[in-house]
Image (tube, rainbow, N blue to C red):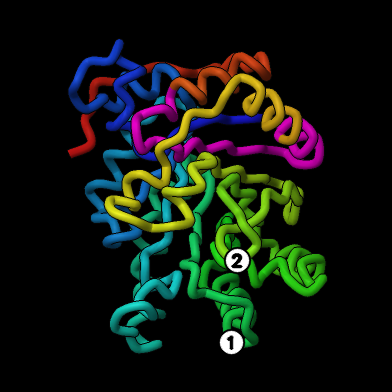
Protein backbone atom coordinates (compact mmCIF):
# COMPACT_ATOMS: atom_id res chain seq x y z
CA UNK A 1 0.00 0.00 0.00
CA UNK A 2 1.25 3.49 -0.88
CA UNK A 3 0.24 6.55 1.14
CA UNK A 4 1.04 10.10 0.04
CA UNK A 5 1.16 13.20 2.20
CA UNK A 6 2.75 16.59 2.75
CA UNK A 7 4.85 18.36 5.35
CA UNK A 8 2.32 19.99 7.70
CA UNK A 9 -1.23 20.61 6.55
CA UNK A 10 -1.60 24.38 6.85
CA UNK A 11 0.62 25.72 4.05
CA UNK A 12 -0.99 24.25 0.93
CA UNK A 13 -3.35 26.76 -0.73
CA UNK A 14 -3.66 24.46 -3.76
CA UNK A 15 -6.01 22.33 -1.64
CA UNK A 16 -8.41 25.24 -1.06
CA UNK A 17 -8.52 26.75 -4.56
CA UNK A 18 -5.55 29.03 -3.80
CA UNK A 19 -7.26 30.93 -1.01
CA UNK A 20 -4.61 32.82 0.94
CA UNK A 21 -5.18 31.40 4.38
CA UNK A 22 -4.09 28.42 6.41
CA UNK A 23 -5.57 25.10 5.36
CA UNK A 24 -7.70 23.47 8.04
CA UNK A 25 -6.98 19.91 9.06
CA UNK A 26 -10.37 18.66 7.89
CA UNK A 27 -9.72 20.15 4.45
CA UNK A 28 -6.34 18.45 4.25
CA UNK A 29 -7.59 15.08 5.55
CA UNK A 30 -10.23 15.04 2.86
CA UNK A 31 -7.47 14.72 0.25
CA UNK A 32 -4.50 12.90 1.82
CA UNK A 33 -4.30 10.10 4.42
CA UNK A 34 -0.87 11.03 5.78
CA UNK A 35 0.92 14.09 7.14
CA UNK A 36 4.42 14.79 8.42
CA UNK A 37 4.72 17.20 11.36
CA UNK A 38 7.83 19.07 12.45
CA UNK A 39 6.49 20.78 15.58
CA UNK A 40 7.89 17.89 17.61
CA UNK A 41 11.37 18.78 16.35
CA UNK A 42 11.24 22.08 18.23
CA UNK A 43 9.53 20.85 21.38
CA UNK A 44 8.06 17.65 22.78
CA UNK A 45 4.33 17.89 22.01
CA UNK A 46 1.95 18.51 24.87
CA UNK A 47 -0.33 15.57 25.72
CA UNK A 48 -3.37 17.73 24.96
CA UNK A 49 -2.11 18.40 21.43
CA UNK A 50 -1.41 14.72 20.80
CA UNK A 51 -4.90 13.75 21.97
CA UNK A 52 -6.44 16.32 19.63
CA UNK A 53 -4.39 14.95 16.73
CA UNK A 54 -5.83 11.53 17.48
CA UNK A 55 -9.42 12.75 17.80
CA UNK A 56 -9.43 14.89 14.67
CA UNK A 57 -8.03 12.22 12.35
CA UNK A 58 -10.31 9.98 10.26
CA UNK A 59 -9.93 6.23 10.60
CA UNK A 60 -6.81 5.15 8.75
CA UNK A 61 -5.17 8.57 8.82
CA UNK A 62 -1.57 8.50 10.01
CA UNK A 63 1.04 10.94 11.29
CA UNK A 64 4.79 11.04 10.87
CA UNK A 65 6.48 13.00 13.64
CA UNK A 66 9.98 14.41 13.55
CA UNK A 67 12.13 13.43 16.49
CA UNK A 68 13.08 16.27 18.80
CA UNK A 69 16.24 18.12 17.79
CA UNK A 70 18.25 16.84 20.75
CA UNK A 71 17.35 13.28 19.76
CA UNK A 72 19.02 13.90 16.39
CA UNK A 73 22.08 15.70 17.75
CA UNK A 74 21.16 19.03 16.15
CA UNK A 75 22.32 20.59 19.40
CA UNK A 76 25.90 19.64 18.43
CA UNK A 77 25.88 22.56 16.01
CA UNK A 78 25.08 25.00 18.81
CA UNK A 79 25.32 24.18 22.51
CA UNK A 80 25.45 20.41 23.10
CA UNK A 81 23.16 19.11 25.81
CA UNK A 82 24.22 16.53 28.35
CA UNK A 83 23.58 12.86 27.64
CA UNK A 84 21.32 12.80 30.68
CA UNK A 85 19.18 15.54 29.14
CA UNK A 86 19.20 13.76 25.77
CA UNK A 87 17.96 10.52 27.30
CA UNK A 88 15.33 12.44 29.29
CA UNK A 89 14.04 13.90 26.01
CA UNK A 90 13.71 10.41 24.54
CA UNK A 91 11.65 9.37 27.56
CA UNK A 92 9.42 12.44 27.44
CA UNK A 93 8.90 12.09 23.68
CA UNK A 94 7.85 8.45 23.96
CA UNK A 95 5.45 9.24 26.78
CA UNK A 96 3.90 12.10 24.83
CA UNK A 97 3.18 10.11 21.66
CA UNK A 98 1.60 7.12 23.42
CA UNK A 99 -1.95 8.07 22.34
CA UNK A 100 -0.83 8.07 18.69
CA UNK A 101 0.78 4.68 19.13
CA UNK A 102 -2.16 3.04 20.91
CA UNK A 103 -4.65 4.47 18.39
CA UNK A 104 -2.65 3.10 15.47
CA UNK A 105 -2.23 6.58 13.98
CA UNK A 106 1.55 6.82 14.24
CA UNK A 107 3.18 5.92 10.94
CA UNK A 108 6.76 6.63 11.97
CA UNK A 109 9.12 8.82 13.96
CA UNK A 110 11.54 10.60 11.62
CA UNK A 111 15.13 11.01 12.76
CA UNK A 112 16.37 13.61 10.29
CA UNK A 113 20.03 14.00 11.13
CA UNK A 114 21.92 17.23 10.35
CA UNK A 115 24.71 17.48 7.75
CA UNK A 116 27.31 17.43 10.53
CA UNK A 117 26.07 14.00 11.66
CA UNK A 118 28.76 12.28 9.61
CA UNK A 119 29.72 8.62 9.35
CA UNK A 120 31.89 8.26 12.42
CA UNK A 121 32.14 5.39 14.86
CA UNK A 122 30.44 7.52 17.50
CA UNK A 123 27.49 8.25 15.22
CA UNK A 124 27.25 4.65 14.03
CA UNK A 125 26.98 3.60 17.64
CA UNK A 126 24.38 6.28 18.24
CA UNK A 127 22.08 4.68 15.67
CA UNK A 128 22.01 1.59 17.89
CA UNK A 129 21.21 3.84 20.85
CA UNK A 130 18.27 5.25 18.89
CA UNK A 131 16.85 1.78 18.45
CA UNK A 132 17.36 0.94 22.10
CA UNK A 133 15.69 4.13 23.28
CA UNK A 134 12.77 3.90 20.82
CA UNK A 135 12.18 0.23 21.64
CA UNK A 136 9.86 -1.28 19.02
CA UNK A 137 8.47 2.00 17.65
CA UNK A 138 8.75 2.55 13.87
CA UNK A 139 11.75 4.78 13.17
CA UNK A 140 12.95 6.40 9.93
CA UNK A 141 16.58 7.48 9.49
CA UNK A 142 17.41 10.33 7.10
CA UNK A 143 21.04 11.20 6.45
CA UNK A 144 22.09 14.61 5.16
CA UNK A 145 25.82 14.04 4.74
CA UNK A 146 27.33 12.11 1.78
CA UNK A 147 29.92 10.38 3.99
CA UNK A 148 27.31 7.69 4.68
CA UNK A 149 27.53 6.71 1.00
CA UNK A 150 31.27 7.01 0.40
CA UNK A 151 34.06 4.47 0.12
CA UNK A 152 31.95 1.55 -0.99
CA UNK A 153 30.61 1.17 2.56
CA UNK A 154 27.04 2.22 1.89
CA UNK A 155 25.98 -1.43 1.65
CA UNK A 156 27.37 -1.95 5.16
CA UNK A 157 25.38 1.06 6.36
CA UNK A 158 22.15 -0.30 4.88
CA UNK A 159 22.79 -3.74 6.35
CA UNK A 160 23.41 -2.12 9.71
CA UNK A 161 20.05 -0.33 9.49
CA UNK A 162 18.43 -3.65 8.62
CA UNK A 163 19.97 -5.29 11.66
CA UNK A 164 18.50 -2.52 13.84
CA UNK A 165 15.10 -2.57 12.10
CA UNK A 166 15.49 1.11 11.18
CA UNK A 167 13.79 2.34 8.02
CA UNK A 168 16.16 4.13 5.65
CA UNK A 169 14.57 7.35 4.40
CA UNK A 170 14.89 7.61 0.61
CA UNK A 171 15.50 11.29 -0.02
CA UNK A 172 15.25 13.07 -3.34
CA UNK A 173 17.37 16.20 -3.13
CA UNK A 174 20.23 17.92 -4.97
CA UNK A 175 23.53 16.05 -4.71
CA UNK A 176 26.91 17.12 -6.07
CA UNK A 177 29.19 14.56 -4.45
CA UNK A 178 30.20 16.91 -1.66
CA UNK A 179 26.83 17.96 -0.31
CA UNK A 180 23.38 16.43 -0.28
CA UNK A 181 22.75 12.72 -0.64
CA UNK A 182 22.09 10.53 -3.69
CA UNK A 183 18.66 9.16 -4.47
CA UNK A 184 18.98 5.57 -3.24
CA UNK A 185 15.75 3.53 -3.27
CA UNK A 186 16.86 0.87 -0.77
CA UNK A 187 14.60 -1.09 1.59
CA UNK A 188 15.89 -1.79 5.10
CA UNK A 189 12.68 -2.87 6.87
CA UNK A 190 10.01 -5.27 5.57
CA UNK A 191 7.15 -3.31 7.09
CA UNK A 192 7.74 0.14 5.63
CA UNK A 193 9.56 2.32 3.13
CA UNK A 194 9.70 6.09 3.38
CA UNK A 195 10.33 8.61 0.59
CA UNK A 196 10.95 12.31 1.33
CA UNK A 197 10.89 14.44 -1.81
CA UNK A 198 12.61 17.78 -1.30
CA UNK A 199 12.90 18.83 -4.95
CA UNK A 200 15.96 19.54 -7.09
CA UNK A 201 16.64 23.22 -6.47
CA UNK A 202 20.43 22.87 -6.65
CA UNK A 203 21.27 26.51 -6.05
CA UNK A 204 18.97 26.88 -3.06
CA UNK A 205 19.92 23.54 -1.55
CA UNK A 206 23.68 23.53 -2.05
CA UNK A 207 24.81 27.16 -1.98
CA UNK A 208 22.90 28.44 1.05
CA UNK A 209 22.72 32.06 -0.06
CA UNK A 210 20.20 34.63 1.10
CA UNK A 211 16.92 33.12 2.32
CA UNK A 212 18.14 29.61 1.48
CA UNK A 213 16.13 27.90 4.23
CA UNK A 214 12.99 28.93 2.39
CA UNK A 215 14.28 28.76 -1.16
CA UNK A 216 15.93 25.34 -0.97
CA UNK A 217 12.56 23.58 -1.29
CA UNK A 218 11.29 25.92 -3.99
CA UNK A 219 10.81 23.35 -6.73
CA UNK A 220 8.05 22.00 -8.94
CA UNK A 221 8.48 18.44 -10.21
CA UNK A 222 7.72 18.04 -13.90
CA UNK A 223 5.37 15.37 -15.21
CA UNK A 224 8.38 13.39 -16.43
CA UNK A 225 10.05 13.59 -13.02
CA UNK A 226 6.85 12.44 -11.32
CA UNK A 227 6.67 9.50 -13.71
CA UNK A 228 10.26 8.52 -12.91
CA UNK A 229 9.68 8.85 -9.18
CA UNK A 230 6.48 6.87 -9.50
CA UNK A 231 8.35 3.97 -11.07
CA UNK A 232 10.89 3.94 -8.23
CA UNK A 233 8.16 4.14 -5.62
CA UNK A 234 6.20 1.32 -7.23
CA UNK A 235 9.28 -0.90 -7.31
CA UNK A 236 9.99 -0.27 -3.65
CA UNK A 237 6.35 -0.74 -2.66
CA UNK A 238 6.46 -4.32 -3.92
CA UNK A 239 9.05 -5.11 -1.26
CA UNK A 240 7.28 -3.76 1.84
CA UNK A 241 3.90 -3.71 3.54
CA UNK A 242 3.51 0.07 3.53
CA UNK A 243 5.18 2.87 1.58
CA UNK A 244 5.01 6.45 2.81
CA UNK A 245 5.70 9.34 0.41
CA UNK A 246 6.07 12.89 1.72
CA UNK A 247 6.41 15.90 -0.58
CA UNK A 248 8.54 18.58 1.07
CA UNK A 249 9.12 20.75 -2.04
CA UNK A 250 6.95 23.53 -0.68
CA UNK A 251 9.13 26.64 -0.79
CA UNK A 252 6.67 28.20 -3.25
CA UNK A 253 3.72 25.95 -2.36
CA UNK A 254 4.22 23.27 -5.05
CA UNK A 255 3.98 20.19 -2.84
CA UNK A 256 0.21 19.62 -2.94
CA UNK A 257 -0.07 19.82 -6.72
CA UNK A 258 2.89 17.47 -7.18
CA UNK A 259 1.44 15.03 -4.64
CA UNK A 260 -1.80 14.92 -6.60
CA UNK A 261 0.18 14.35 -9.79
CA UNK A 262 1.89 11.32 -8.21
CA UNK A 263 -1.41 10.03 -6.86
CA UNK A 264 -2.90 10.14 -10.34
CA UNK A 265 0.26 8.74 -11.97
CA UNK A 266 0.06 5.70 -9.68
CA UNK A 267 -3.75 5.52 -9.99
CA UNK A 268 -4.16 5.59 -6.22
CA UNK A 269 -7.56 5.94 -4.59
CA UNK A 270 -7.32 6.69 -0.89
CA UNK A 271 -10.15 5.32 1.22
CA UNK A 272 -11.42 6.47 4.60
CA UNK A 273 -10.95 10.16 3.85
CA UNK A 274 -13.51 11.81 6.08
CA UNK A 275 -12.89 15.40 7.19
CA UNK A 276 -13.71 16.35 10.75
CA UNK A 277 -14.29 19.79 12.18
CA UNK A 278 -12.04 19.44 15.23
CA UNK A 279 -9.20 21.92 15.17
CA UNK A 280 -5.63 21.35 16.28
CA UNK A 281 -5.48 23.89 19.10
Where is residue 89 drawn, in percent x and y? 35, 73
Height in image: 80 above or below 48?
below
Q: Is residue 160 visible?
A: no
- Looking at the rendered image, the quarter that the N terminus falls into is top right
The residue located at (67%, 45%) in the rendering is 193
* Res 161 label: none
Q: Is residue 265 visible?
A: yes
Where is residue 86 drawn, in percent x and y? 38, 79
Q: Secondary structure at mark 2?
A: loop
Quarter-wise, where is residue 248 in the image? top left
Residue pointed to by mark 2: 178
Identify which residue, 132 or 147, lies in the foreground. 147
The residue located at (34%, 52%) in the rendering is 212
Where is residue 202 drawn, in percent x and y? 51, 47
The residue located at (57%, 80%) in the rendering is 126
Q: Is residue 215 magenta?
A: no
State left or right for residue 191 relative to residue 32.
Answer: right
Identify which residue, 216 or 186, lies in the foreground. 216
- Looking at the rendered image, the quarter that the C terminus falls into is top left
Q: Residues within 10 Å of mark 2 (few under 14, many from 20)?
A: few
Q: Residues within 10 Å of mark 1 (few under 14, many from 20)?
A: few
Residue pointed to by mark 1: 122
Q: Secondary structure at mark 1?
A: helix
Height in image: 4 above or below 88?
above
State left or right for residue 165 relative to residue 139.
Answer: right
Magenta-drawn segment: 233-256
Quarter-wise, where is residue 119 in the image? bottom right
Identify which residue, 20 or 251, lies in the foreground. 251
Please identify, in this view, whether the residue under mark 2 or under mark 1 is nearer the observer: 2
Amino acid sequence: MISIGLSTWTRHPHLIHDEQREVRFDEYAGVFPLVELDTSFYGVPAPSAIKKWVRQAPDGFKYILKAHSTMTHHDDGHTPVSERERMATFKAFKMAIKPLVTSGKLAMVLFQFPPFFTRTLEHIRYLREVRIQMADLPVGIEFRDPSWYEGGLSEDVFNYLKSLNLTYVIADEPFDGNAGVPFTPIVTTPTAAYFRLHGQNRRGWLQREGSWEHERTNYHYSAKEIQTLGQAISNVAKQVEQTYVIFNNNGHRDAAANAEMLRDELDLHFTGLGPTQIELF
